[in-house]
Image (tube, rainbow, N blue to C red):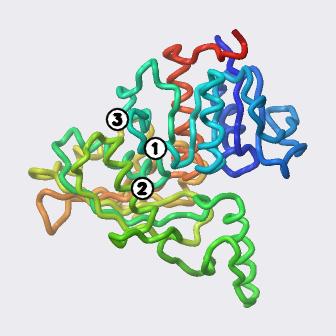
Amino acid sequence: MKQYRVAILGATGAVGQEFLRLFARRQFPVSAVRLLASERSSGKLLKFKSHNVPVQAVSADAFDAVDIAFFSAGSEAARQWAPIALQKGAVVIDNSSAFRMDEGVPLVVPEINWHVVRPSHRLFPVGNCTAIILMMAVAPLRKFGRIARIVASSYQSVSGAGARAMQELERQTRELADSKPLTPQVFPFPIAGNLFSHNTPINEFGYNQEEWKVIQETRKTLESPGLAIEITCVRVPVLRAHSLSINVQFDGPAPAVGAMREAYEAFPGIKLVDDRQNNTFPMPIQAAGEEDVLVGRIRQDATNPNCVSVFACGDQLLKGAALNALQIAEKLAAQELIAEPLASQ
C-alpha cells in the first residue's frame, strides 16, 4: 500500500489534534507527518501514535515533498499558504471558508457528491460544519422527490469556535457552579448557562455569517442553486457536537416514516437513533466522538402533507471538519489521484 507524506497546518488546534487521532484510528497510510503552526507554537511536541513529533513554524519549505497538506488554521493562513503548497505539488484539503465558493473548486461531502471530483482537482475545501451535518441529514431524503425548501435551527457547540472556546465553557461552568461572575474572553457573551445567536457578523439581509455559509454551501454541494433554505444558528453551552432541527418540504407528498427510516439506515455515515417508545433521540453527548451523524425524531409534519421533520447531531470536529477532510484523502488515495509532489521528482 502506498504511504503518504502529510502536513497539518494548524496542528496544535482542536481540529489538528483530531487529524492525528484519526490517522491512527482509521489506519491512514502515513509515512511521515509534518506538524505546522505559528512561530509561537514552534518546538511544542505532539503525540502521533507512539512518537512525539515536534511542531515547526510554517514556511514555504515546510511543504517540500508533501503529498497531502491538511489545513485547519483559518482563511487568512489558507489564502497565504495553499497556493504555495499547491505549487509544490501537494493536494490541499482546507477546513477554512477561504475557497469553498470559488468557481471550479469542488465542495465535497464524500457520501453525497463525490461524482463532482475530477483528476485535475488539487484543492478541496471542507464545508461549514453545520452545513455538513445538515446535508448528511437531508441527502438521504432526496430519493423521495425534489426538495423544495429546508427550514432549520442549529444548536451549535463551542467546539466550532476552537480549543480556547471549549476551555472557556469549562471555566465558566465552574464559575457558574461557584456563583462567581462569568468572564467571557473568546465569546462576546457568557456561554455557560446561556445561549445566543451565532457570534458572527450580520449581513444586509439580516442573516449572520454562519447562516449565510450554510445556505450558500448547501446549495453548492447539493447542486441545487435555487433551493430555498431558512436557518437560524444559535450557540449553546454544549462542549462538542452540533445539533439541528430540520423541516424538509418536497414538491409533492412526503414519504412515509418507515421509508425514511430505511433510507437513513442504508445511507453511509448515518446512524439512526429514533426510539419513540423510550423517548430516545439524537443527543450531542452521544454524538461527541462519533464518526457517524445521528438522525432521529423522524416524523411527517402534521401541518403540511409535503413536509417531514427530523433531528440530527454530529461531531463538529469529526464529520464537521477533520473526518470529512480525511475521507476526501481516503477517496483520493483509493482512486490513485494523489500524484508525487514536485519536490520529490
Residue 144 relative to residue 111: left or right: left
Q: Residue beneath label 3, please?
A: 266
Label 3 to label 1, Cα distance in Å?
A: 28 Å
Q: Which mark is residue 110?
A: none
The percent position of residue 291, horizontal first and vertical second, equals: 54, 42
Helix, strand or loop under label 3: helix
For numbered disc 2, what is the local secondary structure? helix
Q: Which mark is residue 100?
A: 1
Give the labeled residue for mark 2: 213
Q: Nearer the viewer, residue 4 or 252?
A: 4
Image quarter hosting the N terminus = top right
Displayed quadrant of residue 165? bottom right
Task: Mark 3 or mark 1: name the one nearer the start of the chain.
Answer: 1
Task: Judge from the rendering whether residue 226 lies leftward or rightward of residue 109; answer left or right.
Answer: left
Q: CA distance from mark 1 to mark 2?
A: 9 Å
- State which quadrant residue 167 falls in: bottom right
Marks 1 & 2, CB-CB < 8 Å contact:
yes
Image quadrant where one finds the C terminus: top right
Which residue is most to the left?
252
The vertical placement of 32 against 37, above or below, is above
Q: Residue at 42%, 52% (x, y): give it.
A: 131
In this rendering, would 299 be left or right of 203? left
Residue at image coords 57%, 44%: 95
Identity of the amino acid at label 2?
Answer: Lys
Instruction: Give the amino acid at mark 1.
Output: Arg
The residue located at (31%, 42%) in the rendering is: 222
